[in-house]
Image (cartoon, helix red, strand yellow):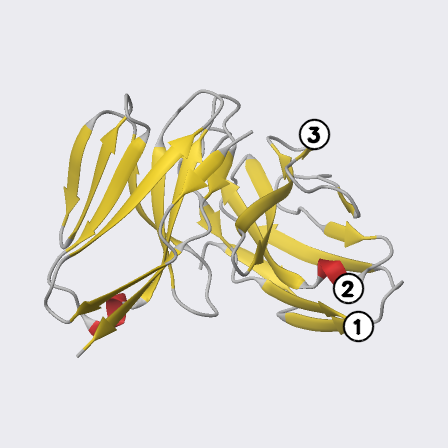
Amino acid sequence: IAGITQAPTSQILAAGRRMTLRCTQDMRHNAMYWYRQDLGLGLRLIHYSNTAGTTGKGEVPDGYSVSRANTDDFPLTLASAVPSQTSVYFCASSHDETGHGYTFGSGTRLTVV
Amino acid sequence: GQNIDQPTEMTATEGAIVQINCTYQTSGFNGLFWYQQHAGEAPTFLSYNVLDGLEEKGRFSSFLSRSKGYSYLLLKELQMKDSASYLCAALSNDYKLSFGAGTTVTVRA
């Protein structure tokens, strides 16, 4: 079934640890995105990639890094997790940067303690 | 920066109509999206407007006024399964989607 797969579904992480959230899509979408969703704040863009080999910073990029080595994968790395990074993380993709065909993954619930 | 405003909560009765308003201010404008998100799940696409006017899709309709920076989502013949959060999102000139905080709609029997 075509779509976006995120892993893990949930994770409890000790502060200071490194963590990579995985995101894979099989729709051959060019653009991919990482959002965090916090109560009362809605979805906020962390990083994005308009095409393989390129990435850009979103609204809240500090403490996060991404890479886009190929079309399908867009991992998000927290180099040294802090409690304020406790959130639900959604990966999304679209046909291109115009936003059409925007599809979200099922999310990763991360708790940093 | 981008600014998307929508009400926090709305409550309505099964079978009724509810209108969720959204105002937006973005760096340029390339369209307005509405998403539905059930608790613990991913957002799912509902509608897209780029021209002024009303787009109807079954029980859901979405309206856009570009000159007023205003949109609404109309939910008709409400069903219990419509209880969810509804997210308004505006696409700016650099093709980034900015989301509102979401409106939680509770449908009561």
Disc 1 marks a residue whose amino acid type is Val
Residue in the picture at 45% in, 20% down? B28
Split into 4 quadrants, where in the image is the C terminus of chain B? bottom left
Split into 4 quadrants, where in the image is the N terminus of chain B? top right
Disc 2/disc 3 C-alpha distance (Å): 29 Å
Q: Considering only order in the chain, which callout, 3 or 2, is on the residue closer to the N terminus?
A: 3
Callout 3 environment at 10 Å: few (<14), some (14 to 19), or many (20+)? Answer: some
Disc 1/disc 3 C-alpha distance (Å): 32 Å
When the figure is inspected, residue B35 is found, relative to residue B15, above or below; the finding is: above
Q: Which residue is mark 1?
A: A113
Side of B69 relative to A44 (left or right): left
Name the image quarter holding residue B64: top left
Furthest toward the bottom, the residue is B109
Callout 1 environment at 10 Å: few (<14), some (14 to 19), or many (20+)? Answer: some
x, y (%) of residue B48? 30, 37
Q: Which residue is mark 2?
A: A83
Name the image quarter holding residue B5: top left
Marked residue chain, label 3 = A
The residue lying toward the viewer, choosing from A83 and B10, is B10
Q: Where residue A54 is drawn, which disc sits there?
A: 3
Q: Secondary structure at mark 3?
A: loop
Q: Where residue A96 is drawn, which disc sits there?
A: none
Disc 3 marks a residue whose amino acid type is Thr
When the figure is inspected, residue B55 is found, relative to residue B92, above or below; the finding is: below
